[in-house]
Image (cartoon, grey):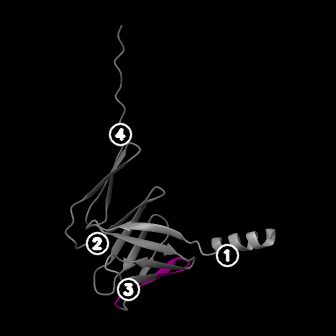
Amino acid sequence: MKNLVILFFAMLSSGLYAQSIIINPDGTHSVVIDHGVHKVIVNPNGTHSVAVSSGISNIIVNPDGTHSQIMGEGTSKIIVNPNEPHSTVTTQGDSQRVLIHPNSGFQPFFFKKQGDKMIILPNGSILHFKKMKKKRKHKI
């Protein structure tokens, strides 16, 4: 009986995969299901994209069959789109990622993290602003 219970929980836990959520600029959400090397992106319209990781470069198979390649290491990566100009993915901290399309016409993206303010401009450049502490005047 003990072995049967252990086998049941082992089978149950083997089907669990990590999930992330992408919040799109229009407010819709995409779910990313992580299977290790392959990640499945469920788009809001019901289509699926597959991201295949192979070290430094990753390939995204789009729902229409075209491929996009993600290249780079560290906090900035470049997505080579099949029919558009390149996009930049910028990672700030552990979880904040911003996708920047160079010709999208979007307004600059403002965000704040632990007192630091950053502006990501449509051309992909980042402006950092640090919160300055006010100096106290000492009374004599």
Q: Quadrant of residue 100?
A: bottom left
Farthest residue, direction right: 2
Magenta-drawn segment: 51-64
Q: Which residue is mark 1?
A: 11
In terms of secondary structure, what is the magenta stretch mainly? strand
Name the residue that disc number 4 marks: 131
Q: Earlier in the sequence, mark 1 or mark 4?
A: 1
Name the amino acid, label 1.
Met
Q: CA distance from mark 3 to mark 1?
A: 32 Å
In the image, taking residue 109 as reference, residue 63 lies left or right, namely right
Coordinates of residue 118 in the picture (x, y in percent):
33, 52
Q: Which mark is residue 138?
A: none
- Furthest-top residue in this view: 140
Residue 16, given in percent of the width and then of the height, sits at 58, 71
Left or right placement of residue 69 versus residue 117 in this view: right
Work out whether mark 4 precedes mark 3 in sequence or the reverse, and give the earlier one: 3
Measured Cα–Cα span from mark 4 to mark 3: 41 Å
Mark 4 vs mark 3: give the one in front. Answer: 3
Disc 1 crowd rating (10 Å Cα; few below 14, some 14-19, many 20+) is few
| Badge nearest the viewer, 3 or 2 | 3
Q: Earlier in the sequence, mark 2 or mark 1?
A: 1
Residue tagged 3? 62
**Amino acid identity at mark 2:** His
Q: Name the amino acid, label 4.
A: Lys
Q: In front: mark 3 or mark 1?
A: 1
119 vs 138: above or below: below
